Amino acid sequence: MKKFISMLLVVAILAAFMIPVMAADSSTQVDKELQNAIKFVKSKIDIPKECTKFNYNIYNRNDQIVWSLGWTDTESQKSINVQVNEDNFISSYNSYDNLQNDSKKIPKFSKEQANKVADDFINHMDSTLPGKFKLNDTTANDYNGGYSVNYIRQENGIKFKTNFINVIVNSYTGKVTGYTCNYSKNTKFEDASKIISLNQAQKAFAEKLGLKLVYKVKTEKDKPVTYLVYVPKTTNKYIDAITGDIETSNSRMYEYGESALAEKMAVMDAAGVVSNIALTPDELDAVNGISNLITKDEADKKLRSIGNLNLDSSYKLTNSYLGKDWRNSNSLAWTLSYSKVLDESKKLTKSVQITIDARTGAFIEFWSDNMASAGAVPQKSAEQAKAICDEALKTLLPDVYAKVKYDNSNVTKDSKLENSYSFRYVRNENGLECPDNYISISYDNLLGEIRSFYTYWGKDLKFADPKNVISVEEANKVLFNKIGYGIQYIPGDSDSDDDVNMDYKLGVLNTKNAVLGYFSDSSKPCNISAVNGDILDNSGEVYKDNKIADYLDINGVKAADKVRVLTQMGIRYVEDDLKPTNSLLQKDYFILLSRLNDFYYIDRSSNDDKMIENMYSQLINQGIITKEDKAPLSVITREDAAKYFIKFKGLSDVAELKGIYKSSFKDANKINPNLVGYVCLATGFKAMNGSNGNFMPKNKMTRLDGLMTIYNFLAAK
């Protein structure tokens, strides 16, 4: 039956096959299979009776037929989507209800109850799965009122992270709204009875792979600065858990390379999204008078004189602009765009864009959109292509060329000719790499030319002498004891990234073999401060995990259960201690209100001062507060709390309407007349109330009081 249906499915969709026009008997057979798939899904999942519009797709992947089934109510936009294969294995389920009120409120289901709901749902989907998957963690998705319950497969008591289950449970209704199961049923797992010990693996890592000391770049006071850190020497190799030898992984188990900003910019720039920041007319007038800037014509002449670029007279200058170079805040750059007609009858053109420093004329970046003709084949080996790129780098940036080292840490030896190659050259200072500063060159092996050339290079960076640093042995101890190092199964197959991604999308993983290896814990960054051994995040700050923990001093606190509910929802102060009776400062109340209203200004990865300043800047820019409101260390009174609670709700204009508010509190005359509307609205929302008929507007709030305004508001919804 499997082969029969497979013969009917052609025309690739997402690397799968759609059904062509079929003979009547073939169509009848597929209709029967579809009917069986629908019946099975409806035996497992309740399809709302109002979802009457049905649609489906069929995919063929890894010799598996996958049905993608959908039910929709066109009026309410409620929808159900399910993926199920021919063996009646449901790999995904999603329920969407446009009319459901998912605004934030106090959950009716606890995390423990959500875990039970998820366990029962998995068992209902397939009773064989609970014996294969173990609960890993449960996180609260405060933006959609749900819990994300995550499971990882274990074999022989060892994790196989490639296989996982994720269940989304609505914390208000207790219903499952999302389910994903990535499970390779027929995987053969390497025998775990002869593994080397953890101590042996750690020793092998230190001797054969190890850490290296590098410079990384972070931003301090809007300026890039370097710092010293230990990182893994390579990101695609691991210690074989049986032999203790080095093996190469097909997928990256952890990342350490360029900073988050540089990586993000690299991807966007390569896609044509980011370029240099254009100047305003006033800025242009200002810089045009600077005598040391080269003109557009001088820039054009210089580029046409560079032999590697091959800009002959057939290339027409179509656009140019002077802008700020995002890589170096004090630099200006000319970006020139050229176009060449390849075939006028077919309207085929080739576009080239080049950026150079507007003061020195130094080359910065280049990209071309030229496409190879149909039938083109790879021409050169990786070594030959690299030699061409080496020469281009040496010619275009001779000073840079003298300071870089080719990065082959993630290169696999393969004699096969590829359609394209990418080469990365990392900056070296004082004998150490600076992976945040590098040159990236892409070679099109079908066209036989360089496709792109990007530089990520800080001009005025200073590199400290790497003498006063902790030893690599001390750094290894941080890796093994604080970051974590342990055994796990990984796929032993060599599928391409595209194939693996498609397998995940369709839930038809086909991992034939799983092998054992030792790896660092990928949930933490493997960046170890060379100064004091702290674990650092990608911004160079001390790493803070995103796990939401109870306050250390919560036991015995009045309303502790309510505080814990808010903590579970992600509404908490940033400190580890609640300090419930301490006065409530403005900055701390703003943190709570930002989290309540999902403004996402709170970045735990940055230091506290930077986080607070960033929060205020964004609140002011968004018009939520004014510059005059800003007083981070001021103590919040009850009428202040009412004011800011309503401001964060975007209701200032309503609160400030004149002549419509009258407070019933006995001490209403003590409320600032300009804040009466705020107090009335805050009490109307049940965020605040009085005592014995009094509001006590001038009383100072405590940190516990601040949390209770949030809880009372949510509990009343």
Image (tube, rainbow, N blue to C red):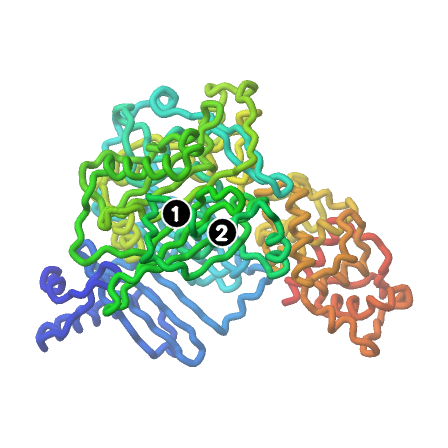
Dot 1, how many residues are within 10 Å of its Cα: few (below 14), some (14-19), or many (20+)?
Answer: many
Dot 2, how many residues are within 10 Å of its Cα: few (below 14), some (14-19), or many (20+)?
Answer: many
Residue at image point 27% right, 40% down: 491
Q: Position of residue 712 (x, y in %)?
A: 69, 61
- Whether residue 188 appears in this view of the structure is no
Q: Amino acid at mark 2?
A: Trp
Residue 294 vs residue 431, the one in the foreground:
294
Which residue has dot 2 on it? 334
- Whether residue 223 appears in this view of the structure is yes
Q: Secondary structure at mark 1?
A: strand
**Looking at the image, is 344 positioned above or below residue 324?**
below
The reply to whether discs 2 and 1 touch (Cβ–Cβ < 8 Å) is no
Residue at image point 65% right, 61% down: 622
Q: CA distance from mark 2 to mark 1?
A: 52 Å
Residue 240 vs residue 355, the one in the foreground:
355
Residue at image point 86% right, 57% down: 698
Q: Secondary structure at mark 2?
A: strand
Compared across the picture, whether 361 is left or right of 659 comes to left
- Disc with the residue nearer the chain's start (2 vs 1): 1
Q: Amino acid at mark 1?
A: Tyr
Compared across the picture, whether 556 is left or right of 364 comes to right
Q: Quadrant of the C terminus?
A: bottom right
Which residue has dot 1 on it? 151
**Looking at the image, is 215 positioned above or below residue 31?**
above
Residue at image point 77% right, 63% down: 643
